[in-house]
Amino acid sequence: MSGTQYSDTITDMAPEPVGARRVVVLISGSGSNLQALIDAQSHDRLGGEIVAVISNEPDAYGLKRAHEAGIEAVVLPHREYDSRDAYDGALIKVIERHEPDLIVLAGFMRILTPRFVQRFLGRMLNIHPSLLPSYQGLNTHARALADKVASHGCSVHFVTEELDGGPVVLQAELAVSIDDTQDTLKDKVHAREHLIYPIAVQWFLEGRLQYSAEGAKMDGHLLPAHGMRLSHEDAAEELDENVDD
Ligand code: GRF
């Protein structure tokens, strides 16, 4: 046995434990989706750890939610930068300091530069209040109501350079009733967002979900263009909603 150094203890030989997957969340406002992610994490249902929350708005209520959960909350006000490119450059630096596996946009109200998107391509998710590809952009509930659609909802998608145009991962559907208003739609869609966003994040952090140029892949299989979909009935049951509403 001479000449070779052997370990004294079994722990010396054990492989390094793989650290928790790291998530950075970007917000601009209320942060109710952030709260859903925090709640999932506290129930061990996120598959990783939110290591920082970054807001471009100093007064975002989501910052308070982060503080209360003991998560580092960073304010990076876009108004202090001369250009979109300068801001996104600074944001890249702050994000990378936290060495995230995944960047989660949760109501981050900024148009992203191509440089920013390319830096995190394949590891950045967004949630959007419509059944994409319908109603990309703003005022989704008003537009859905004006079109008298029967079905509305929300989508989690990978972020690409096309605004709200990246591969869809998961959607939750909502049957629009004749009595729905912008406010009722907003509330029902929000409830569905809080249901599906933590699930999609967990899929990603567990390595089940991948980005590819052709679309999102789940367990190695290409998903349909609308991703996985939670029906109105299943979502309503999960949320204890009255399906006759
Ligand atoms: C959500 O409706 C989400 O779909 C959109 O921005 C809103 C954020 O809400 N991207 P909150 O700040 O998570 O409450």
Image (cartoon, grey):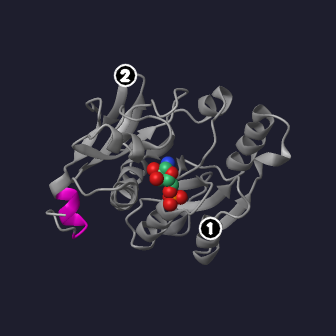
Q: Are marks 1 and 2 in contact (CB under 8 Å)?
A: no
Q: Which of 103 and 189 is in front in this view?
A: 189
Q: Which of 117 and 192 is in front in this view?
A: 192
Picture layout, residue 20 above or below residue 150: below
Q: What residue is drawn where x is 62% and y is 67%?
A: 61
* Amino acid found under the numbered disc labelled 1: Tyr
* Amino acid found under the numbered disc labelled 2: Glu
Q: Nearer the viewer, residue 186 or 202?
A: 186
Q: What residue is drawn where x is 35% and y is 62%?
A: 191
Residue underneath mark 1 = 61
Q: Distance between the residues labelled 1 and 2?
A: 37 Å
Say which quarter of the image contains residue 180: bottom left
**Range shown magenta:** 234-240
Specify whether 29 is left or right of 34: right
Specify whether 144 is left or right of 151: right
Residue underneath mark 2 = 214
Query: What is the crowding at mark 1: few (fewer than 14 residues within 10 Å), some, or many (at least 20)?
Result: some
Residue 33: x and y, percent? 47, 60
Residue 111: x and y, percent? 63, 36
Q: Is mark 2 on a helix, strand or loop?
A: loop
